[in-house]
Amino acid sequence: MNRISLSAAVVAIHFMASASVQAQTTSPQVVNIYSARHYQTDEAMSANFTAQTGIKINRLDGKEDELLERIKNEGASSPADVLITVDASRLELADKANLFQPMNSKLIQDRVPASLRTANWAAFSTRARVIVYNTAAVNGQWVSTCEDLSNPRLKGQICVRSGSHPYNLSLGAALIAHNGEAAVEAWAKGVVANFARTPKGGDTDQLRAVAAGECGVTLANTYYVARLMRSTLPADIKDMAALTVVWPNQKTSGTHVNVSGAGVIKTAPNRANAVKFLEYLASDSAQAYFADGNNEWPVVKTAVTKNPALDKLGAFKADDLAVEKWAPQTTTAQKVFDRAGWR
């Protein structure tokens, strides 16, 4: 079984609308959204959409894989019109499960870069996966690329989350698209050989471990770094003082960029409203809400956001390889990481 899917168990999903999604399946004034994103800015974003269109949003919040499994189990009777989720690997998984239908929206095609969408789903914000090291423990010249993490001089220095997590699988998939499966397997084996500890916890746990000197270097999504940078807690300020962030692969392919995105469910009872909602997500105003909710970047070039932490991290060269070129490699990445012992 693919490790980024779940078995049939679905837990702790709740409605975030005044009326049940199940109670209003089809209506000219309703769109039913299953969302793995639930930030304060989403409330304002939804309210603005309803004010502009008169279309009410019924939103079901849940964890990424649980929502995917729920839609599968509901089948043709699912009330879901839109699935919003994080990570291209999960969007690809939903697409491979035949859950999406083509959006056929010229507006989305015009506003969302071609490299950040497929025929069936589109990205609406981006985040980068960066290298973060302990300034006192690791020479910054040793960690300028992701490939550097397999170098034996980093033995005992790497803390990282599970190789089965979508964030690492997506990075592995992009590396496979660039370097080939054999090269990435050799790289993964080198990374495993450099582990300071067995993979555990999330990205924030890795950042704290590096700051504490438990290890010297890690990989983390930029929004985790930005959260610590924006925190006023003394412990977080102390941790960030010990850390340096590297944009990997600036002289080669560019830093790996992942996405939050959405697609229209194949059985959507309110398809027209679903497309209107995704087109709204591509508007400048919604882009600002969508990106700011999780310290991410908008995908639309004309959208303006003000994030002091991301601004402080500075400009970087992003890997512009199209998601449709690398996202399908996530299954291969899982096999490669399994063979390398990255679990």
Image (tube, rainbow, N blue to C red):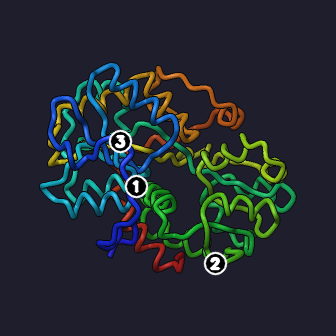
Q: CA distance from mark 3 to mark 2?
A: 41 Å
Q: Is residue 31 left or right of residue 75?
A: right
- Identity of the amino acid at label 3? Ala
Q: Is residue 336 left or right of residue 18?
A: right
Q: Which mark is residue 17?
A: 3
Q: Measured from the top left, where is residue 200 in percent x and y?
A: 61, 72
Q: Dot 2 lies on which element?
A: loop
Q: Viewer-nearest of labels 3 and 2?
A: 3
Q: Dot 3 lies on which element?
A: loop
Q: CA distance from mark 1 to mark 3?
A: 13 Å
Q: Which residue is situated farthest in the left direction here?
A: 76
Read off the residue under disc 2: 198
Q: Nearer the viewer, residue 261 or 11?
A: 11
- Identity of the amino acid at label 2? Thr
Read off the residue under disc 1: 62
- Identity of the amino acid at label 1? Gly
First in sequence, mark 1 or 3: give its number. Answer: 3
Dividing the picture into quadrants, the one containing residue 335 is bottom left
Dividing the picture into quadrants, the one containing residue 278 is top left
The residue under the point 38% across, 58% down is: 13
